Amino acid sequence: MSTPATAPVGRRAQIAQAYRITKREYPRIGWLLLAIFLGVGLVVGFAAWVWIHPAAGVMFGLLIGLLAVIVVFGRRVEKAAYAQVEGRPGAAAAALQMLRRGWDVKPGVAFTKNQDVVHRVIGRPGIVLIGEGNPNRVRNLLAVERKKHARLAQDAPIHEITAGDDEGSIAIPKLTKHVQKLPRAITPGDMTDLLQRMRALDAMRPQAPIPHGPMPTSAKGMRKLMQGR
């Protein structure tokens, strides 16, 4: 009997946490959401009231108003979460957790004592190496990692990305979209084989101490809520 009640409680906790994080970045988020609900709901509801039926007006007004609130709130949650991790060590690793199914994210496959880190993502584009830290040191670290991965990559492409605010780097809020837009080059079967080969490489080195931020627990949790999980 306890299992059915767990999901609603968990979702309420996720919503509450997401709201608290968002409110720190956008103090008037509550008023904004209320204005959107009333504005969109009244416009849609009035149109349905006139052209369809009064009952349809009430129903459509409530549903469309609520949908507009969910969309806007989800985007604000994501922006607030990015704002809290951007500029901190491990920000790229936190952002990469937003990638959906079909991507294998491995934070900290290589790192230095100066907190320069390389993360790895494997998906249909092949191998994506993402470096964050000092641009000059990161480029050298990426070059070393490219050689290591190339030995086991076979025909899979290897992409290199530097994350940050420097020229030629990808800003943290744009990182996941940039990765998702890379051209597909391997099949799902090739990806499975590639992951198995990468395990041998990963087993030879320690895991980097990646700091954890609010991204995985807030924005990612909110994404699960909107997907009905």
Image (cartoon, rainbow, N blue to C red):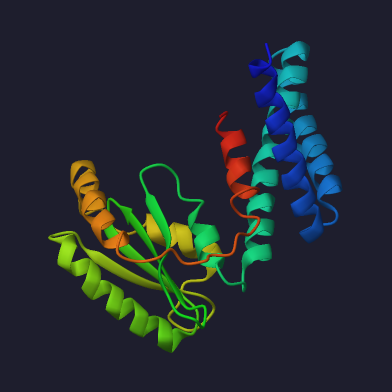
Q: Is residue 54 left or right of residue 185?
A: right
User: Which residue ends up furthest to the left in the rendered image?
Assistant: 154
**Spot occupied by residue 144 in the image (x, y as percentages of width and height):** 28, 79
Q: State how many labels appear.
A: 0
Residue in view at x 23 percent, y 42 percent: 188
Comparing 116 with 63, the one in front is 116
Q: Is residue 36 above or below residue 159?
A: above
In which quarter of the view is residue 80 placed?
Answer: bottom right
Q: Is residue 185 above or below residue 69?
A: below
Comparing 73 with 34, the one in front is 73
Q: Let me know if residue 47 appears in the view.
A: no
Q: Is residue 10 above or below residue 165?
A: above
Residue in view at x 81 percent, y 50 percent: 29
Residue in view at x 47 percent, y 84 percent: 167
Which quadrant of the figure contains the C terminus? top right
Residue in view at x 78 percent, y 25 percent: 46
In which quarter of the view is residue 120 placed?
Answer: bottom left
**Spot occupied by residue 135 in the image (x, y as percentages of width and height):** 45, 85
Comparing 148 with 101, the one in front is 148
Which quadrant of the figure contains the N terminus? top right
**Spot occupied by residue 19 in the image (x, y as percentages of width and height):** 77, 46
**Spot occupied by residue 162 in the image (x, y as percentages of width and height):** 42, 75
In which quarter of the view is residue 169 placed?
Answer: bottom left
